[in-house]
Each structure stands twice: as structure tokens, then as C-alpha cells.
């Protein structure tokens, strides 16, 4: 894959990132108490492309190997006990 510019988008609620087709390269997450969970689908109601549980009350960095995870529409389906998440994509 040819090199491309990496961009970022911070979210605090579920829904589409509205970035068009993209490859997720990395995600930074700030979790709160309880059982933090992040679920990403390819579009609203689409197939799950990433489903992660985190340790409570911490910051986390999720590095995606190789060319990242491709999605036609990066959609955050579940954002439980997470204050914010920053997606790095190309």
C-alpha cells in the first residue's frame, strides 16, 4: 500500500466518524470506572471489525498492525465507560 497522510478524530459518543472509507491505524482511549468497552463496526449495523475491553480508569493505546483495519464507514457502535477515544486513520 502506498504511504498516505495520517489524520485523527476525537469522539466522545457513539456514531459514525464521518471520515469516509478509512484504515484505522491506532486508537487512544481514556477509560473510566466499570467495564470499559469499545466496539467498531463497518457502518451502522454492519459487521464488527474491532471489539475491545479495557482496564478501568486508565489511558490505553491500541496499535493496529500492518495496513490497519479497513472500513467503508468507521462506526462506533459501543463506547461504554470511556470518556473519549481518538482515532488515527488514513
Image: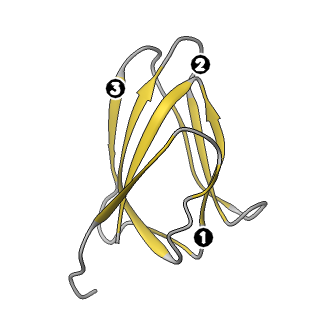
Q: Which of the numbered marks, if any, corresponds to residue 59?
A: 3
> Gap in Å between the C-alphas at discs 1 and 3?
25 Å
Q: Name the N-terminal-most of marks 1 and 3.
A: 3
Residue 81 located left or right of residue 3 = right
Q: Is residue 56 above or below residue 10?
A: above
Q: Which of the numbered marks, if any, corresponds to residue 73?
A: 1
Q: What SS does tag 3 mark?
A: strand
Q: Is residue 75 above or below residue 20?
A: above
Q: Is residue 90 above or below residue 75?
A: below
> Can you give x and y, in whole percent of width and height, for residue 17 in the image?
55, 60
User: Residue at 49% across / 17% down in the picture?
Assistant: 32
> Gap in Å between the C-alphas at discs 2 and 1?
26 Å
User: Residue at 60% across / 70% down in the picture?
Assistant: 73
Q: Which of the numbered marks, if any, corresponds to residue 43?
A: none
> Gap in Å between the C-alphas at discs 2 and 3?
14 Å
Q: Which residue is mark 2?
A: 35
> Can you give x and y, in whole percent of width and height, for residue 15 in the image?
66, 52
Q: What SS does tag 2 mark?
A: loop
> Can you give x and y, in whole percent of width and height, for residue 3 in the image?
20, 82
The answer to whether the residues at label 2 and label 3 have Cβ atoms under 8 Å apart is no
Check disc 3: other Cα within 10 Å, few if <14, some if 14-19, many if 20+.
some
Q: Name the N-terminal-most of marks 2 and 1.
A: 2
Kindly indicate the quadrant of the structure image that contains residue 89: bottom left
Quarter of the image where the N terminus is located: bottom left
Q: Name the N-terminal-most of marks 2 and 3.
A: 2
Amino acid at each position: 500500500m502506498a504511504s498516505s497522510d495520517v489524520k485523527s478524530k476525537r469522539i466522545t459518543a457513539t456514531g459514525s466518524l464521518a471520515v469516509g472509507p478509512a484504515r484505522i491505524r491506532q486508537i487512544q482511549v481514556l477509560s473510566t470506572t466499570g467495564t470499559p468497552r469499545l466496539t467498531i463496526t463497518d457502518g451502522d449495523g454492519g459487521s464488527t471489525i474491532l471489539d475491545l475491553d479495557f482496564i478501568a480508569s486508565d489511558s490505553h493505546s491500541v496499535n493496529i498492525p500492518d495496513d490497519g483495519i479497513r472500513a467503508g464507514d468507521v462506526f462506533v457502535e459501543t463506547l461504554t465507560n470511556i470518556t473519549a477515544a481518538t482515532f488515527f486513520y488514513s
